[in-house]
Each structure stands twice: as structure tokens, then as C-alpha cells.
């Protein structure tokens, strides 16, 4: 029998477990985080005498590399999501882990994709004990049903780096997919059939894991440049015929939403950015690769051109839409964490103004600052938001865990954070009384832009003042919510969850526990 | 099994002799609105007098007004003689009915059997929304579309847009009127209109429904001319009823009728457009140009709208919300136009004050129609002014 879970109420009013998978936890205290103490994690000291002096670290197979890494039950193995939905390496990895008879692995991916549905049998058979990383789609559904042996831990990209750096997660073996690598282990993501762009998500792993395996389908003679991953951190190199399905690693073309409502939201956001005075010479912004975000960039671009405004930098993930800004001289730089299409990959490879970044530079909260708070405007999505601007990005209103956090929490520290969201999806209101899972405290969210109007957070008196006399459709959250509830036919029922059975926890950027995701009663 | 579209639901109803009501719901929003859906179905069955039946619902997040329409259609397919209705909640009425002279720059067509685009259509701020029962609805779905359009007229807030319905031709159209006119549409669109008698018979049918339901205000009529015969009869059509607020031209059908391809340049339809426009103006009603059917080509739409405006048209048809802003922008008067109009109005005002019969601006004499047009430009300028010249 499992021990009953004990909970404590954190400063956000959410119940969180006192311990998770046997590790003691700190409840969320403040938005700006706790004051950390101690020193960062270290790795065992290694010596060149134990590595081939000719620099050739190639071993014959992944199985061989895992054996040499000393794989055993209960270890933590990390992978990364830069191959996105085209990744076939992770499935091969766990096939080998199973063949080696190893069980109870903590899988520590930087994110998961629908293709990772293939890993469910390993979760069922106990090869994987639990996942610490995003659980999307099928994996999330699996976890929501209470089927995972351990409790999932959801972290933002920045918090993943923080947890490794602070020693909260010790990675035994990092398996890094490298679209291009040399025999010494230098690797990058901009050349080869599986080219994906930057490899920043694997940076922490390469620096802090006990053993680092680089797996490539494109071995090049030394030196592999640029070295996004330094071979000096790498134990072994494995060559495989293919890392994945190139057509799903990056898309050939980038599709901007045709949905009239999303176009309208994008238009409102761009209008807001200009009216609030954010769009000014030398400004910076970040928008994701979702349909609404791309539409927003295009609408903002029209306004930038018509006002003759140029940005100093824009943040990726990059797409053709951002690369066009660079090519047309509307921004000096792209600072990029991942490339979503072929144009993005090509630009990062060939254009020195298109710079690869990592969660360390962009997001790590336990560093000497990070880039996120320097950005003037960030446009994000959400699954739910309440009238105090608290938002959810991981669960749906029915309680199911379906998305990861990505860089979402980290981005909230921008100078102006906007959620660009529809006010309801199909029949489900997006503006709710209380978010199912708290992922972002409302004090960091400055405006919510919906197709039915724009609500500015009253805490941002400066923004309220800046747009007050404009033609923007300004409304209160309560007003939009009332309208939406009338359309949807009243308040939805509360999801039926088991409050004694956490299936995952949500970390805040400082490593404290912000909220809990519960098992959903399936009917 | 037919596929259920997003924001829609499929309802089937099999009547039984006994056994009460059995409601089976498969809904993508089941855990959130499953009970609400069940309550609404039971309420609907009570309203329609259905006591013993098995009702299956496959729901992809339909809003309540959609669910109500789908339920009523399913019930009445099985029992066409049921005369009771299941009407969803009503929006407060807006005081726009019966205003013949109001801006109709954009009219947005919405397929009458596709609920997905209805709830948010008004947010895109078209001057008119048109719930279409005609060409966009398959013959086998006419009944379902009618319930949906009726419910949309009751439940959906289209904000300041004129609420219009395009009815079917012939007897089907008269049946449409019986269903939709009691829900206070502002305008009824009469498709493929070829003669004055058609308009008169529709005006009579509307009058009958208005009378039966003691409706206040007046439902207007917008004939759409889509054939050579219609063009020839344009004057008679425009003057057939005081309810006619405008004439529209539909070029897809017109070009098919005269047996030519529709081109972007539009030389083949120039006479028809000018004829419809001139006859409308002769009667003193508005003239509305055809739709621009390439949704991606916004530059083409802009050129076409500027041309329509220059030819004397007051509006343009839209088949996608993104076309609306382009059309509105093209219809904005330019700064130069507004400046000139202000001078004319000021001169007319000065002449009136000093009791002069003749208005002049500089060395030019200004006629009454020019003054009217100037007023019109200033009124349009309240929607915004375009800085550059059309060219």
C-alpha cells in the first residue's frame, strides 16, 4: 500500500505535496522566488588519460554506450526535444534499455511530443518509473488516469536548467541527439539530414550529467563546427542510420492561421503593442510558433513598416516569418532557442545575426539574470485564465494533463506579458472562476487579449493609462467572462478529480511547488 | 455515420411506443456540460411533446442554440406534424429595423447550416451579416439550416450588424419566411430575382407573417440580380415595393447566365453592373456589388472595391471576415474628398443663412445632388478617412 500523500497549502492558496517521489519539496512562496543558498552541482572529475588520445570516442552501438555508462535500475536518463515530433531516437533508446533488463528509469526529457506515445508500454512495464518533463497528448492522458508509477514533475525550460544546475535533478546518463557530430563529441543541429537548429535544450545535460552519449546520423571529420555541444563534455559517440523523420523534425512550410477569430486576436495584440507605446525603435519581442502568434508577428510587421520602427532583437522559436523580419531589416538580431521550419534552420546556420540561445542564457532563474526579463513584449497562449489573470497552460478544464510548460513561465518575466487567447473554445469558456492548474501567477500577466476584447491587468497602472483613451476594445475580465458564460450556456461543471491522488506537480521557476495535477476520474 | 463538425452536433431521434425518454450523449465537452446537454434535451422534448424516444447525440462542442436546432430538426424529421417549437433564449432587440438608408459597405455571407462561424461573426464588424439558406446549403439539409438560422437570429449577438437572411427561391423561400420573419431579421435577401412580381409576392408573404405575429417595424427586402432578365427588369424590381432597400448584383450566376467566364477585369459584366446601379439610384435605393471570391487575394479585393465605389456602388459582398476591413477601408472617403465635401456643405449652409437660392463655391455653382453627396461623404467619414488617393 502506498503512503497517503500529505499536502500543504502554498502562498498561492494551492495544495501541494510535501514530498514528491520521495524528495522533500518547498511550497511556492513568492513570484520572485526564494533566496537560494549553497553551491551548484558538480560532476566527477575526469581525466584525459581515460579517453582515447586520438579523440575517437565512437562506440559500436547505443547498447554498448549505455553499458559503458554503467546503466542500472533507477537511474535518470535525459533526452531532448529538438527533433520534435520526428524523434525516433528516444523510442530506440528505451527499446535498448528494456533489452538490457533495466527498470525504474526516471525519464527526464526537455519536452515530449505525440510521437512519444510509443513509450507508454515502457511506463506500463516499469522500464520507465515516471516522467519529469512535459507530458503531451497521449502521455498526459496516460498520466491523468493515474497509470504512472511515480509522480510527474512539470518544469519550464528555465526551471529544468535550474533543477540540474542546483543539483535537484541529477542526470546519470544524457543521450543527446546530434544532427551533426564528430568522433570527439562536438555536435550541432544545423547540418545533416536531421538538422533541427539549436541544441540549447541539451546544454545543461552536457555540462552536469555523469555520462554523456552523443548519437548522430551524420558523423563528420573533426572538427564539427560550430560546437553547440562541446566534445570535452562527451563520453561516447554513437552513429545510427537515422535520428528520425526529417519532415516532422522541422516543417517545410510555415502555416499562418486562417481562422478569422485568431486573426482578429492577432490584430488586437498588434494594435495594443503600438498603442501602449511598446512598439518603438529598438524594442524587442517574443512570440511563439502557434498560428495566432505568427499572425500577430505579421500584423505587427505591417505596423512596424508603416511607422518605420525597427526592433533591436526578436526571440525565437524561429520560423520564416521571423527570418523575413531579419532579411527585411526590421530587426537587428534573432535570439533563438529552437527553429520550427527549414527557413529558421538555414538562417541560423548562414546568418551571423541569427544567434542560438539556451535555457541558461534565456530563462534560468538561478543565474545572474537572464534574457527573459529584458524582452519588451511577449505574446503567449493559455488553456485557462481567471479574472485575476492567473493562468493555466498544462491542463484543460476537464482536468486532463495535455500540455507541457515550455518556456511559458520563464517568459512571464518580460516587461509586458500578453495572453492572446480565444474567450471560449468550442463550448468551453477559457475565462474561468478558478484555473484548474495554476502555472502563472496573475501578477506577472499584464493583459489578456481575446476576440471579444482586451483586459489590461489593473495592477499595471502604467499600461492602463497608456491605452485608456485609445480605440482599443478595452473591457474587464469579468465583463468578457459574463458574455462568454451566456454564450456557452452557463458555468461548466467542475472536473471530477481524486484530491488524494496527485499525478504531477507544477514547479515554479525557483524550484518550489506551485500546484498539483490530480488523477481524473474516467467515466 | 456522418462526421460531426467542430462546434456542431449530430442528433438522431427514434420514436418508441413506450419506455420514456432515453438520452445518450457522446460529447467532447461531456465532463463539463454533459448534464447541461441532458437538461436541454429533456427541456426540448417537453416543449416539442416528445415523451417516448431514444435520442443519440454526438457533440463536438455545440453551443446551446445549435444543440436546440439540431434536436428540433431531428424530432421533426421523424414527426413532421409537430407544430410546437423549441426556441432558445432571446437577445435583446436592437433598434435598427426598417432603416433603409444605412451603411451597407460590407455584407458577410454565413453558410446557414454551419454553426462554427456564427457566434463570432459580429465581432468582425460587418455592416450586414447574411445567414444563407440558399446556395450554401445542400438540398437535403434545408430543414436543418432553417432551425439553425432561426435560432441564430434569436440567440446570437451580431452587435450592430444588420441581421439578414437569404431565403430560397420559390415555395421553399415562402416556407423559409414563415420560420425566420418572426425572429425580426432586418433584411430578407431574394436570390436570382428576375421580376417585380417575385418581390411583391415575397413582400406579401412577409406582411402576412408580420401581421400574424403582430410584429412591429418593417422587414426590408434586398433583391439580388443574377441574370440577364433580372438586369433588364432592374428598375421594376427596385420600385416593386417600398420595402426594397437596395439592389445587389451576383456576378457568378450572371456570367453563367450569359454564358461567359467571370474575369477580374469584369468587362463582360460592366453593362449589368452599371445597369443595376443606375436603376437602383433611379429609384433612390442603394446598389451593392458582387462578392470577391478569392479570399487570399486581398489586393484584388481592394482594387475591385475601389472600382465598385468609383462606379457608384455602396457596398461589396464578403465571403470571409478578413475581407471586411479591406472593404471598409476602400469605402472610406479620402482626405481630399472630405475637405471638398466640408467646403460644399459650409457653402450650402452659408447660402441658406443668407437666404440665397443658389449655392456657389468659388466660381462654381453647386447643384442640390452635389450637396447631398457631400453630406453623404461626411457621414461616411465618421467611419474613418483614408489618407492616400485611391490611385
Image (cartoon, rainbow, N blue to C red):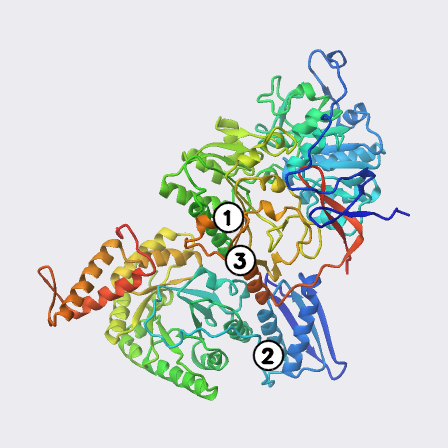
Where residue A186 appears, x then y in whole percent?
64, 21
Closer to us: mark 2 or mark 3?
3
Q: Position of residue B341 (x, y in %)?
A: 21, 61
Question: Taking B189 as reference, is A73 left or right?
Answer: right
Q: What is the total number of numbered labels drawn onto the structure image?
A: 3
Q: Earlier in the sequence, mark 3 or mark 1?
A: 1
Contact (Cβ within 8 Å) of mark 3 with mark 1: no
Q: Quadrant of residue B292?
A: bottom left
Q: Residue at x 80, y 36 (%)?
A: A105
Label 1 Cα crowd, 10 Å radius (few <14 / some 14-19 / many 20+): few
Q: Secondary structure at mark 1?
A: helix
Q: Is residue B193 visible?
A: yes
User: What is the C-alpha distance between the residues marked 2 and 3?
Assistant: 34 Å
- Residue B328 higher or lower than A71, as above or below: below
Image point (50%, 39%), residue name:
A376
Tag 1 residue: A461
Badge 3 element: loop
Q: Which residue is mark 3?
A: A476
Dividing the image into 4 quarters, which one contains the C terminus of chain A?
A: bottom right
Outermost residue to the left? B363
Q: Are marks 2 and 3 on the same chain?
A: no
Local packing at callout 2 (Cα closer than 10 Å; few below 14, some 14-19, many 20+) is some
**Residue B358 horizontal/vertical position (percent):** 11, 69
Provide the chain ID for the residue under circle 2.
Answer: B
Q: Is residue A367 left or right of residue B209?
A: right
Reading the image, the residue beneath label 2 is: B86
Label 1 resides on the chain identified as A
Residue positioned 64% across, 34% down in the render: A365
Res. B129 image quadrant: bottom left
- Asked if the residue under mark 1 is in contact with the one under mark 2, i.e. CB atoms within 8 Å, the reply is no
Name the residue nearer the viewer: B388 or A349: B388
Residue A295 visible at all: no
Amino acid at each position: 500500500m502506498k503512503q497517503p500523500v500529505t499536502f500543504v497549502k502554498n502562498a498561492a492558496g494551492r495544495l501541494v505535496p510535501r514530498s514528491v517521489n520521495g524528495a522533500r519539496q518547498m511550497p511556492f512562496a513568492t513570484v520572485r522566488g526564494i533566496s537560494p543558498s549553497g553551491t551548484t552541482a558538480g560532476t566527477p572529475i575526469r581525466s584525459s588519460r581515460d579517453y582515447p588520445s586520438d579523440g575517437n570516442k565512437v562506440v559500436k552501438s547505443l547498447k554498448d554506450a549505455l553499458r559503458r555508462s554503467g546503466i542500472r535500475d533507477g537511474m535518470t536518463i535525459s533526452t531532448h526535444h529538438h527533433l520534435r515530433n520526428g524523434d525516433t531516437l528516444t523510442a530506440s533508446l528505451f527499446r535498448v534499455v528494456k533489452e538490457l533488463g533495466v527498470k525504474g528509469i526516471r525519464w527526464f526529457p526537455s519536452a515530449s511530443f505525440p510521437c512519444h506515445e510509443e513509450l507508454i508500454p515502457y511506463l506500463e512495464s516499469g522500464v520507465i518509473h515516471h516522467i519529469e518533463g512535459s507530458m503531451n497528448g497521449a502521455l498526459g492522458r496516460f498520466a491523468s488516469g493515474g497509470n504512472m508509477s511515480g509522480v510527474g514533475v512539470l518544469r519550464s525550460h528555465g526551471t529544468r536548467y535550474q533543477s540540474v544546475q542546483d543539483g535537484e535533478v541529477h542526470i546519470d546518463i544524457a543521450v543527446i541527439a546530434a544532427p551533426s557530430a564528430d568522433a570527439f563529441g562536438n555536435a550541432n543541429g544545423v547540418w545533416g539530414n536531421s538538422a533541427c537548429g539549436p541544441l540549447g535544450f541539451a546544454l545543461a545535460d552536457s555540462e552536469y550529467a555523469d555520462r554523456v552519449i552523443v548519437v548522430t546520423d551524420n558523423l563528420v571529420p573533426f572538427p564539427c563546427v560550430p560546437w553547440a555541444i562541446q566534445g570535452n563534455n562527451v563520453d561516447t559517440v554513437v552513429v545510427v542510420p537515422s535520428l528520425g523523420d526529417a519532415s516532422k523534425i522541422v516543417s517545410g512550410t510555415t502555416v499562418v492561421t486562417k481562422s478569422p477569430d485568431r486573426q482578429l486576436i492577432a490584430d488586437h495584440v498588434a494594435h495594443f503593442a503600438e498603442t501602449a507605446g511598446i512598439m518603438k525603435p529598438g524594442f524587442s519581442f517574443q512570440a511563439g510558433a502557434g498560428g495566432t502568434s505568427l499572425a500577430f508577428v505579421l500584423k505587427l510587421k505591417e505596423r512596424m513598416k508603416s511607422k518605420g520602427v525597427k526592433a533591436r532583437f526578436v526571440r525565437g522559436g524561429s520560423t520564416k516569418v521571423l527570418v523575413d523580419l531579419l532579411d527585411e531589416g526590421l530587426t537587428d538580431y534573432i535570439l533563438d532557442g529552437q527553429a520550427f521550419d527549414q527557413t529558421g534552420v538555414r538562417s541560423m546556420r548562414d546568418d551571423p545575426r541569427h544567434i542560438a540561445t539556451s535555457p541558461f542564457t534565456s530563462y534560468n532563474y538561478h543565474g545572474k539574470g537572464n534574457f527573459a526579463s529584458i524582452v519588451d513584449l511577449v505574446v503567449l497562449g493559455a488553456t485557462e485564465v481567471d479574472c485575476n489573470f492567473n493562468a493555466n497552460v498544462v491542463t484543460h478544464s476537464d482536468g486532463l494533463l495535455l500540455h507541457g510548460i515550455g518556456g511559458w513561465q520563464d517568459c512571464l518575466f518580460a516587461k509586458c506579458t500578453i495572453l492572446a487567447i480565444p474567450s471560449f473554445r468550442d463550448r468551453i469558456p477559457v475565462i474561468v472562476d478558478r484555473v484548474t492548474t495554476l502555472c502563472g501567477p496573475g501578477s506577472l500577466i499584464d493583459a489578456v487579449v481575446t476576440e471579444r476584447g482586451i483586459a489590461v491587468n489593473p495592477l499595471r497602472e502604467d499600461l492602463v493609462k497608456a491605452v485608456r483613451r485609445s480605440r482599443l476594445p478595452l473591457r474587464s475580465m469579468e465583463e468578457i467572462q459574463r458574455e462568454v458564460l451566456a454564450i456557452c450556456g452557463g458555468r461548466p461543471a467542475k472536473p471530477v478529480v481524486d484530491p488524494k491522488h496527485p499525478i504531477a506537480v507544477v514547479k515554479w521557476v525557483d524550484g518550489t511547488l506551485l500546484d498539483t495535477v490530480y488523477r481524473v476520474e474516467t467515466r | 455515420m456522418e462526421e460531426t463538425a467542430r462546434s456542431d452536433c449530430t442528433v438522431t431521434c427514434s420514436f418508441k411506443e413506450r419506455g420514456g425518454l432515453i438520452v445518450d450523449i457522446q460529447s467532447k465537452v461531456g465532463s463539463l456540460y454533459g448534464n447541461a446537454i441532458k437538461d436541454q434535451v429533456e427541456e426540448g422534448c417537453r416543449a416539442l411533446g416528445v415523451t417516448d424516444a431514444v435520442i443519440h447525440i454526438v457533440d463536438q462542442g455545440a453551443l446551446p442554440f445549435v444543440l436546440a436546432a439540431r434536436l428540433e430538426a431531428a424530432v421533426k424529421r421523424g414527426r413532421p406534424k409537430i407544430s410546437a417549437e423549441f426556441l432558445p433564449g432571446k437577445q435583446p432587440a436592437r433598434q435598427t429595423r426598417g432603416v433603409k438608408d444605412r451603411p451597407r459597405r460590407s455584407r458577410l455571407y454565413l453558410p446557414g447550416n454551419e454553426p462554427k462561424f456564427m457566434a463570432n461573426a459580429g465581432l468582425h464588424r460587418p455592416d450586414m451579416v447574411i445567414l444563407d439558406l440558399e446556395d450554401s446549403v445542400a438540398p437535403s439539409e434545408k430543414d436543418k439550416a432553417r432551425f439553425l438560422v432561426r435560432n441564430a437570429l434569436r440567440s446570437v449577438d451580431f452587435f450592430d450588424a444588420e441581421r439578414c437572411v437569404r431565403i430560397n427561391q420559390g415555395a421553399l423561400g415562402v416556407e423559409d419566411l414563415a420560420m425566420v420573419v418572426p425572429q425580426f431579421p432586418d433584411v430578407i435577401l431574394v436570390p436570382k430575382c428576375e421580376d417585380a412580381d417575385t418581390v411583391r409576392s415575397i413582400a406579401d408573404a412577409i406582411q402576412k407573417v408580420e401581421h400574424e405575429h403582430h410584429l412591429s417595424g418593417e422587414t426590408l427586402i434586398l433583391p439580388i440580380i443574377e441574370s440577364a432578365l433580372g438586369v433588364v427588369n432592374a428598375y421594376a424590381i427596385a420600385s416593386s415595393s417600398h420595402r426594397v432597400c437596395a439592389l445587389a448584383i451576383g456576378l457568378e450566376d450572371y456570367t453563367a447566365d450569359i454564358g461567359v467566364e467571370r474575369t477580374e477585369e469584369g468587362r463582360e459584366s460592366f453593362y449589368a453592373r452599371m445597369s443595376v446601379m443606375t436603376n437602383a439610384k433611379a429609384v433612390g435605393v442603394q446598389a451593392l456589388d458582387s462578392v470577391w471570391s478569392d479570399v487570399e487575394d486581398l489586393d484584388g479585393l481592394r482594387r475591385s472595391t475601389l472600382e465598385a465605389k468609383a462606379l457608384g456602388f455602396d457596398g461589396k459582398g464578403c465571403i470571409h471576415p478578413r475581407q471586411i476591413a479591406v472593404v471598409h477601408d476602400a469605402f472610406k472617403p479620402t482626405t481630399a474628398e472630405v475637405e471638398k465635401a466640408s467646403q460644399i456643405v459650409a457653402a450650402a449652409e452659408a447660402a441658406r443663412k443668407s437666404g440665397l437660392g443658389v449655392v456657389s463655391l468659388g466660381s462654381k455653382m453647386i447643384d442640390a445632388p452635389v450637396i447631398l453627396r457631400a453630406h453623404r461623404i461626411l457621414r461616411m467619414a465618421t467611419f474613418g478617412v483614408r489618407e492616400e488617393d485611391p490611385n
